[in-house]
Image (spheres, rainbow, N blue to C red):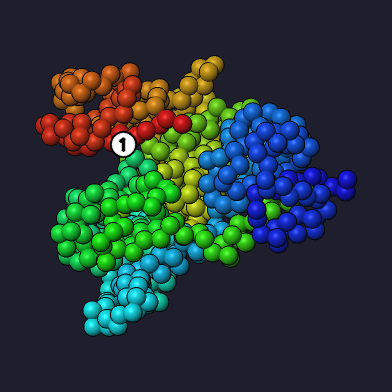
């Protein structure tokens, strides 16, 4: 055997296989193995290259005595038990940029097909009818394209749309104002602004609880009459019944859909009888180039993992010196939580900068991992792809977010402190935390300029209000009426020089506090702000 052995368990581009062999690897291509056969053979290999069908479970990983890397030729890694792989020291890498061009081009293809009635015209002519007078369309030139989600794919779509002479308006609070300016795209303050002004709307959002069903009856009602909607992102972003109703009423002039809530699907309310609807069976990534790119990029990552190189698309924790990890490890969850909290408190329609300050004994270590954890917390759930400790810096960079880290070996009041500052436009917020006790429980020490000490649990709510008696009881009443149990509560202590008329309250609860409860609290006299943050892993 001349080198490491790699098993290619699903079809990839021949160039990817050739690349592996060119580096002296012994490559076996076996794309017809069932789960049992794969389990029997996996112990013979140093690397495994898959697509989406192969399930790399904890049981399979337990049998992979030699395995050092799993390469996924594509974006998602849902079919890989990343936690089990990480525990065994196995690198899991994907190809997150392999299909972004294909997805952007398919978005433009659907937009053009919808605007110019291409599917209808093709069907009419091949059926023996010349219906030129019935198939007039609309130009993209000087129309306004509204982009919801301005990550990699959204930015590529915007660039192409501007080539067609479109005016582009985009909303994404996790992209800096400078990045919008660089791309010549107008930044919307809210989705409602996009709805009110756009002639075409295209979705490029991640699938989260906040974005699920974002295009619903309320959103359609705010749109311009005759708007055309394109979705090449996730089917769950649109409420199908509400879209159908908007099409029937003429509010929406047309829709182009490449993705659906349930796939595969061949029966759908919009598949029959809607001449102004264009559908494709999830073809956004289905180009020869994208498939080749995925195979090549994944093969490159496998080569890097097996030859001591830098695995730039690893989705699990990057290598950290054991002596540093012993100290830093307990602070990784805290930093991720502080990133989430800081983002939840940040105001404005764009994030411009984040600063991570590390004080105390932490500052004596290689603390880059902690800054990565802050970024991961900030961006999680707000990007097209899953955020991890490896890709977080590149995702921040492409959004124009400046990241700075500073260290000081002394900390007041606590042995170690982590401060996270988030700047949005002219405003900035800061949150501070530490870990306490032998089990390193994460604690929040400061938010909104108010000091307190509360152990962080899965669901955190922060309230700002007038500092008068009775406010705690009012909050407890609202949550109690909704059956939400308060686990712990702390009231902010005003630091010297702060406005003495305000206070802050931090609450952890056994269940998430819904938006409706926060809105009810804000109707009570004296309450000025309310935020809820999901801190579950």
Where is residue 471 drawn, in percent x and y? Answer: 17, 24
* 426 lies left or right of 311: left
- The residue carrying pointer 1 sits among few (fewer than 14), some (14 to 19) or many (20 or more) residues within 10 Å by Cα, namely many
In this rendering, the answer to whether 478 lies above or below 210 is above
Name the residue rendered at 37%, 77% in the picture: 126
Where is residue 425 drawn, in percent x and y? Answer: 33, 54
* 396 lies left or right of 168: right
Name the residue rendered at 58%, 65% in the picture: 288
Q: Disc 1 designates what residue?
A: 448
Residue 362, quarter of the rendered image = top right
Q: Residue furthest front?
A: 128
Where is residue 114 drawn, in percent x and y? Answer: 32, 69
Q: Nearer the viewer, residue 481 or 374?
A: 481
Where is residue 221 drawn, in percent x and y? Answer: 16, 55
User: Is residue 498 among the parts visible in the rendering?
Assistant: no
Q: Nearer the viewer, residue 124 or 83?
A: 124
Name the residue rendered at 19%, 50% in the picture: 217
SS for callout 1: loop
Residue 91, quarter of the rendered image = top right
Image quadrant occupied by the N terminus? top right
Q: Which residue lies furthest to the top in this view?
A: 438
In this rendering, the answer to whether 382 lies above or below 121 is above
* 520 lies left or right of 389: left
Name the residue rendered at 43%, 49% in the picture: 264
In this rendering, the answer to whether 271 lies above or below 58 is below
User: Is residue 287 among the parts visible in the rendering?
Assistant: yes
């Amino acid at each position: 055997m001349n080198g490491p052995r790699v098993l290619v368990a699903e079809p990839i581009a021949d160039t990817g296989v050739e690349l592996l062999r060119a580096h002296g690897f012994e490559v076996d291509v076996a794309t017809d193995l069932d789960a049992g056969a794969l389990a029997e053979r996996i112990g013979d290999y140093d690397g495994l290259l898959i697509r989406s069908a192969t399930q790399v479970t904890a049981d399979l990983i337990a049998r992979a005595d030699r395995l050092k890397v799993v390469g996924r030729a594509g974006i998602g890694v849902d079919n890989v038990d990343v936690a089990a792989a990480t525990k065994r020291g196995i690198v899991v890498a994907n190809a997150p940029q392999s299909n972004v061009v294909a997805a952007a081009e398919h978005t433009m293809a659907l937009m053009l097909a919808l605007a110019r009635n291409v599917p209808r015209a093709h069907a009419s002519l091949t059926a023996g009818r010349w219906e030129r007078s019935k198939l007039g369309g609309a130009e993209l030139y000087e129309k306004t394209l509204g982009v919801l989600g301005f990550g990699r794919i959204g930015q590529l779509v915007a660039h192409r749309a501007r080539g067609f002479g479109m005016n582009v308006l985009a909303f994404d609070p996790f992209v800096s104002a400078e990045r919008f300016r660089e791309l010549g795209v107008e930044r919307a303050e809210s989705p409602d602004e996009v709805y009110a002004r756009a002639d075409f709307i295209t979705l490029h959002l991640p699938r989260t609880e906040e974005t699920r069903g974002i295009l619903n009856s309320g959103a359609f009602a705010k749109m311009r009459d005759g708007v055309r909607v394109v979705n090449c992102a996730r089917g769950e972003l649109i409420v199908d019944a509400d879209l159908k109703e908007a099409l029937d009423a003429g509010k929406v002039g047309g829709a182009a859909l490449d993705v659906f809530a349930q796939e595969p699907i061949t029966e759908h309310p919009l598949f029959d009888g809607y001449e102004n609807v264009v559908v494709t069976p999830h073809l956004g990534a289905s180009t020869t180039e994208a498939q080749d790119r995925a195979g090549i990029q994944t093969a490159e990552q496998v080569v890097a993992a097996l030859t001591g190189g830098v695995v730039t698309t690893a989705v699990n924790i990057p290598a950290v010196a054991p002596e540093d990890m012993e100290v830093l490890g307990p602070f990784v969850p805290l930093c991720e939580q502080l990133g989430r909290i800081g983002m939840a408190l940040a105001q404005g329609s764009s994030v411009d900068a984040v600063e991570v300050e590390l004080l105390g004994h932490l500052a004596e270590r290689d603390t880059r991992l902690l800054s990565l954890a802050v970024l991961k917390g900030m961006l999680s759930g707000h990007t097209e792809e899953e955020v991890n400790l490896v890709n977080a810096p590149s995702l921040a960079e492409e959004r124009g977010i400046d990241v700075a880290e500073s260290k000081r070996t002394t900390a007041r009041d606590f042995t170690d402190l982590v401060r996270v500052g988030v700047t949005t436009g002219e405003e900035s917020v800061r949150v501070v935390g530490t870990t306490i006790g032998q089990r390193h429980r994460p604690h929040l020490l400061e938010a909104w300029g108010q000091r307190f000490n509360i152990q962080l649990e899965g669901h955190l709510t922060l309230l700002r209000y007038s500092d008068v008696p009775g406010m705690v009881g009012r909050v407890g009443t609202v949550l109690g009426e909704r059956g939400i149990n308060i686990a712990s509560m702390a009231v902010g202590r005003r630091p010297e020089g702060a406005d003495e008329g305000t206070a802050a309250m931090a609450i952890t609860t056994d269940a998430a506090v819904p938006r409706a409860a926060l809105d009810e609290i804000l109707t009570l006299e004296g309450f000025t702000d309310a935020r809820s943050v999901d801190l579950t892993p």
